[in-house]
Image (tube, rainbow, N blue to C red):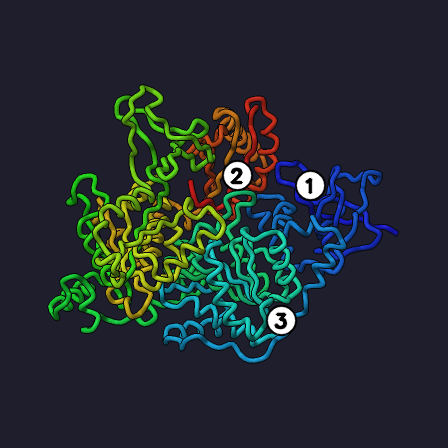
Amino acid sequence: MSTWLCVLVQTPAHAALGPVLTYRSPQSLPPGTLVRVPLGKRETLGVVWEAAAADASGEIDADKVRDIAGTLEGIAPLGAPWQQLVGFAAQYYQRSVGEVALAALPPQLRDLSPLQMQRRLKRIKPPAAMGGTVQAAQALSPEQAAVLEQIQTHSGPFLLFGATGSGKTEVYLHAVATLLASSPDAQALVMVPEINLTPQLEARFMARFGPVYGEQAVVSMHSGMTPPQRLKSWLGAHSGQARIVLGTRMAVFASLPALRLIVVDEEHDPSYKSSEGARYSARDLAVYRGKLEGAKVILGSATPALESWYHSRPAAEGGRYLRLHMPSRIGGAQLTNTDASHATGDANTPAGQAARNAMRAQSGTPDGLPLVRRVDMNHQPRRAVFSLPLLDAIRERVGRGEQCMVFLNRRGYAPVLHCADCGWKSECPHCSAHQVFHKIDRTLRCHHCGFTERVPRACPACGNPDIEPMGRGTEQLEEQLGGLLADVRRPGTESLEHPQGLPLRIARIDADSTRLKGALQTQLAAVHAGEVDVLVGTQMIAKGHDFRRITLVAAINPDGALFSSDFRAPERLFSLLMQAAGRAGRDAALGARSEVWIQTFQPGHALYAALKAHDYPAFAEQQLKERQQAGMPPFSAQALVRAEARTQEAAQAFLNLARQAALSDMAQWPGWDVVLEQVFVYPAVPMTIQRVANVERAQMLVESPSRAALQKFLAAWHDVLHATRAAPDCKGLIRWAVDVDPLGI
């Protein structure tokens, strides 16, 4: 006797299908079972779901119900907490539950034949301890020990607020070691924001846990892996063989049946928020998943997201997280007589040492953290890229065999080419943005749609041959720095062929220089080996990397974010500069003389004052006060509805019609006047970059002081958005999407 099953399949929200589809099966299957089902003319992967058959596809015609093609034998059903996590994410982020669930599974689950799958499963062996105990790499500092004791004795969630270099990773390693030793099957999930941070993390965890639990006990999950690699890691985690899963935001959906600990490192990073598909926040879902599964959650950062900082206020004030503080760097110490002679060019005397210690004390710089220097570019030569004091400081560091890092968050040679005669600029023909000039290969590239063309010999508008770059990118910094420091020689490289020594080596790391596979790892290895004297790059080099020889970090022209229309821009800038500063002086022997140079036209700005004192709490207090006054998150909840169409008129018409229909219809519903009083829907406006790849884009902001009211409104609005799509004024509409808790407006 056959039975009907409700099965999730990967249908996007705009497909107008039900949340689940109904299929026939020769036997009843528990929810979470992976099955192959026919969908149209193809066969796809599905997940048996807990739902009433009548709710699956509306009115069911028994003659049209199709049979499942089979189950994925040997794979245990996905657990109830995983199903709850997927269901919540779909509901909260306004997406189809099938879209969220199937996107979270490795693609090869639906591509491999049953025979191929069985071969993969044979490689998965049950977990087994190899004996021995996990060895600590170093003794814990008093701060680390106190934090770990708090983690052991409280339920969390925890916000680990630790300075860069304070040893947060060591805390994670100890917490995982304690967990695995306490239970033979417990699992831990450790997340980092970007793919390029996973190799060094995997190396540390493998070195610590591989000898005891086996190499298969530690696996990674991120989008840079091949399909076979992703499947292997997923099967290892799902079977329990993998005790530790390391990954980026997608790993929050990993199937971990015995999950007991979740770590979200650099929890402030915007990369944890997905920018396409289901626009979920992996950090927020990690906290929710921890609550579902009774797992402890540790959010770690030197510059926490303001939402997390607000949630970690005292419980008496409504805080939901327990804040743990590690303000000191490992090995941090006051400047001594020994290292004073290396601190600055004129610090070879006790007087120089005293002056530097006084400078640190006056600025409020904590022990062991780099001294922040603000350079007022108003007093430098006009159009100067590098101030003279900064160049002298770089020369001094290179002369001592130390490394420097120059940070500018803009790749390419210049943001735009410009004709002074007629005003022509290198605009992209397909986007409302400029093409970036790349001098290395003489191309103009759009960083939004990818369109590339050769640099014209003369102005296309007036024929003027003297078109020139405006602004600067990392390519230009690398070139200019090479010219300005051409006389500098690397110490210890003197030879008969080079009696004065070899010239200094400058390396650039950005999205352009690391396009080839393995390029990033090769360049980072050169930095770690001391083969690079000055490292130039974008935010790729500002986060997470443990550069032991860097003692000077310079930020070039960071002022743009101070005047951005995006209310989150100051928070992102402060975080980025603090993270970049954290690359300096990570070696305890060099930490006391490490410095961060900020070249700015606004040296008196409050953000730079807080940065100089490494005072994130002061910065957060000021920002939260401003946001509270303006009714911005975390004191309100927001959602953006974005529309893409062939014309800007169609995109805005769709949003405005949906707004009018929702407000007029909902006003008639009993009891909804209370909801509508708490929800404000702004009119549609073009996006900042309104055209990308010949597609026009518009957005509409929905805001409410009540998250519950906003969610209720969005859920009811969903059908209105679907219906509005067919309106005559919306002809040319391509797609629309809801972004709950957006990071960019």
Where does label 2 land, which residue? 673
Tell me which residue sits at (29%, 56%) in the image: 404
Residue visible at 20% across and 73% down in the picture: 338
Residue type, numbered disc 3: Asp
Q: Secondary structure at mark 1?
A: loop
Q: Is residue 363 visible?
A: yes
- Earlier in the chain: of badge 2 and badge 3, it is 3
Label 2 Cα neighbours within 10 Å, binned few <14 / some 14-19 / many ≥20: few
Give the residue at mark 1.
18
Give the secondary structure at mark 3.
loop
Quarter containing the C terminus = top left
Q: Which mark is residue 606?
A: none
Residue farthest to the top, as pictured: 462
Report the front residue among 295 and 131: 131
Query: Which residue: 37% across, 34% down?
Result: 442
Q: Quadrant of residue 461?
A: top left
Q: CA distance from mark 1 to mark 3?
A: 38 Å
Q: Amino acid at mark 1?
A: Gly
Q: Nearer the viewer, residue 34 or 605?
A: 34
In this rendering, does residue 625 appear at all? no
**Which marked residue is nearer to the observer: mark 2 or mark 3?**
3
- Gap in Å between the C-alphas at discs 2 and 3? 51 Å
